[in-house]
Image (spheres, helix red, strand yellow):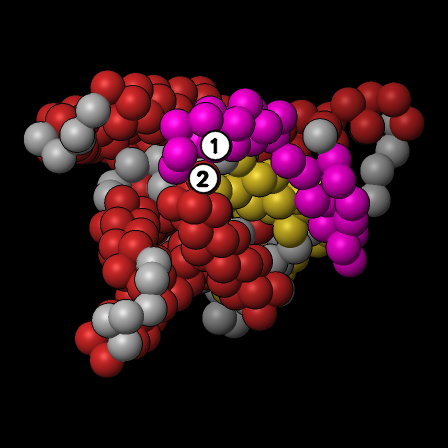
Amino acid sequence: MKLFSVKNIDIKVNLTLIPITLLMYLNEYIIEFSILFLVLTIHEIAHLIFSLINHVKVKELNIFPLGAIIKFEYPLGIDPIKEIIISLAGPVVNMILFIISYILFINFTHINLLDLFVEINFMLFIVNILPILPLDGGRVLRAILYMYGGFKFAHKTVGVIGKISLMILFIIGLLYVRDIFEIIMLSFVIIYLAKAATAENEMAAFILTRGLIRKKIQLKNKAMMKTHFLIVLEGTKLKSILDIILPHKYNIIFIIDEKGNFLGNISEECFFEGIIRSGINEKIETLLISIKK
């Protein structure tokens, strides 16, 4: 449900937040849940700020009971390094808050709830660095694997690691729960993360292609489309070209050598197929050679 917009960013709230809040209140966990929600909000604001700093356009911020999910306007154009920086912003803020609250707790032990603030920030830091999508640790791992092994390899590997991590997290969680309510909440968290990871992996195959499909439909309907021509030197990595691909135009890449001789051209479709197959550190002339074969 959309609440409002701030600088073209839609702020939405998931309706499951209402029954979860009511459930927490009835079981006398409302104070803990309120602090958790506050810390999660700060966590997500850190992601949002670093997205804006890195000039990554944000489409919406969707608030869930366990945090929020930021949706980028053009996921095709996000550099993996930027995704790593944006993803790490949240856990880093949690660690800073943990250190500050721990120092305060040591010196002001009489202040109620400081210990809870310490525990929640530490817990969120640990949980968010786990290599599970859509958690921050999963996004960081995916971005690293994406740079060196390609798009498909990154998602497949993170998916396997995520499933193993979820099982370990559930087993460890069972060792610390105190009553049936906490077992239910632990199960809810695990199921929520498992469903979110499955949804993200199912969408992965479409992330790099949906923009191209949209352009094909536009070309078919209008019989013409604005084109963005790029001229690149041989030896240029696909990563560098990805940074200047325009989402609203059809991109055609011309490759030349250092003497200015024309070597060939690559369509946008072939370019993204090359990224999926070989990764963003592949050189453009290697992709051109494979296409000519």
Q: Is residue 282 visible?
A: no
Q: Tell me: 245 left or right of 138.
A: right
The residue where tag 2 is placed is: 30
Q: Residues at badges 1 and 2 in contact (C-beta under 8 Å)? A: yes
Q: Badge 2: few (under 14), some or many (20 or more) residues near its Cα, within 10 Å?
A: some
Task: Find the distance from the CA under tag 1 to the CA under tag 2.
Answer: 5 Å
Amino acid type of the residue tagged 2 in the rendering: Ile
Residue at 41% across / 62% down in the picture? 89
Residue at 45% across / 39% down in the picture? 30
The C terminus sits in image quarter: top left
Work out which residue is located at the far front of the displayed protein and give it: 110
Residue at 81% across / 28% down in the picture? 219
The N terminus sits in image quarter: top right
Q: Is residue 211 visible?
A: yes
The residue where tag 1 is placed is: 25
- Picture coordinates of residue 243, whole percent (x, y): 56, 58
Amino acid type of the residue tagged 1 in the rendering: Tyr
- Check residue 179 for magenta coloring: no
Which range of residues does the magenta coloring cover?
A: 2-29
Q: Under tag 1, what secondary structure? A: helix
- Picture coordinates of residue 273, whole percent (x, y): 47, 33
- Picture coordinates of residue 276, whole percent (x, y): 41, 35
